Amino acid sequence: MLQTRNGKRTGPAAVRIATDMVREALVTKEDAVARLSSRPSTSTRPLHARLKDPAASEASLIASGTAASPGRGPSGRAAFTAGEAEAMTEKGMAVLLVREETSPEDIGGMHAAKGVLTARGGMTSHAAVVARSWGKPCVAGAGSLRVDASAGTAVVHGTSTVLRRGDWITIDGSTGKVYLGQQPMAAPEAGSGELGSRRFEGIFRAVNGAGPVTVRLLTPLHEFLPQTREQQATLARSMGISAEEIRGTVELCFGYSRDDAGPFIGEYIAKGILPSDPFVHVDEDGVAALIEMACKRGKAVRPDIPVGVCGEHGGDPFSVHVFDRLGLDSVSCSPFRVPVASLAAAQATLLAAKRG
């Protein structure tokens, strides 16, 4: 042999190879699971639509940003406000919501739209988190876009390209690329069923007899807080508390808000202040230590108390491994990240068995 190299393969191909090798008794099931990649870009790709011919679409590329959510149905007409998105959808149009950044006030438009494109934000921005939870495509932080919602335009900085209200655009939530026009799409390689839209009855039928079901009835308040001080003051009066208490219901530990951290998190990582984005990978030194403390103290009082994590960290392979080491019982995440979490949890269990 003159040389060797790693064979490149897609996520579905890797699963097919692992399955065939187990069937032919070449490897054990445990080895097959350990060999698979739990990266979201690999393990969830079969569930999402993709460009039919990426090379041909390059001529229509106008911007790029963070690949925040793959999703399905990534083509639509540009709408620049939540109200526009809802109105255009009611007329039977396929719509993509284009915003500088989104906030809880945009929820109606985000729900109506096929996908979301923002000029600011990242993997843990409001737009990204909501889009992933609904299985919709999202490209966040397309910094070359100058969005003017009042004019209904988005100018691509440094070019003569102007995206106007009603123009067709396509976003690729797997690569972060934005294309002008309605690009040809290939169907998902694997059916996802109703993964992102099942009602409670369907969920309970699906897990009937398979184990206990945990339903979360408490949602973090900060995700739905009004954005203006006047609206916060009105909410505070209705709740009988101060406006300062309303504004204090945000992420603690680091004291960062995921909607505001985008501009400086990258610099913190570059300068070695943080090893990674704490909204993407759980912080081992601080946050994980607090989780471990809560877990140990809770189980000391009630040994059978179930302890789990709900949120985007539940679909991050690195974080899932940390939670497994801490002794947590479960994780919960966006529907389309469930395959990632399941594979990462299985791999964490195998590693724990090896460590003894």
Image (cartoon, grey):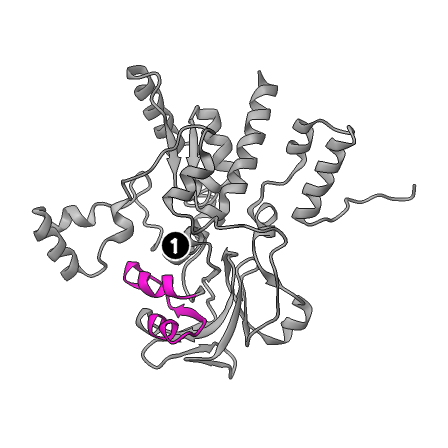
- The residue located at (67%, 35%) in the rendering is 35
On the question of residue 228 being in view, the answer is yes
Asked if residue 278 can be seen in this view, the reply is no
Image x and y of residue 272, in percent: 47, 44
Quadrant containing the C terminus is top right
The residue nearer to you, when weighing 47 against 253, is: 47
Q: Position of residue 209 (x, y in %)?
A: 46, 29
- On screen, 52 above or below 146? above
Q: Is residue 88 magenta?
A: yes
Is 274 magenta? The answer is no
Nearer to me, 329 or 94: 94
Q: Which residue occupies 48% across, 25% down? A: 325
Q: Point out the stretch of residues depicted in magenta.
A: 85-113
Q: Amino acid at mark 1?
A: Val
Residue 115 shown left or right of residue 57 in the figure = left
Residue 269 percent across, percent down from the top left: 47, 47
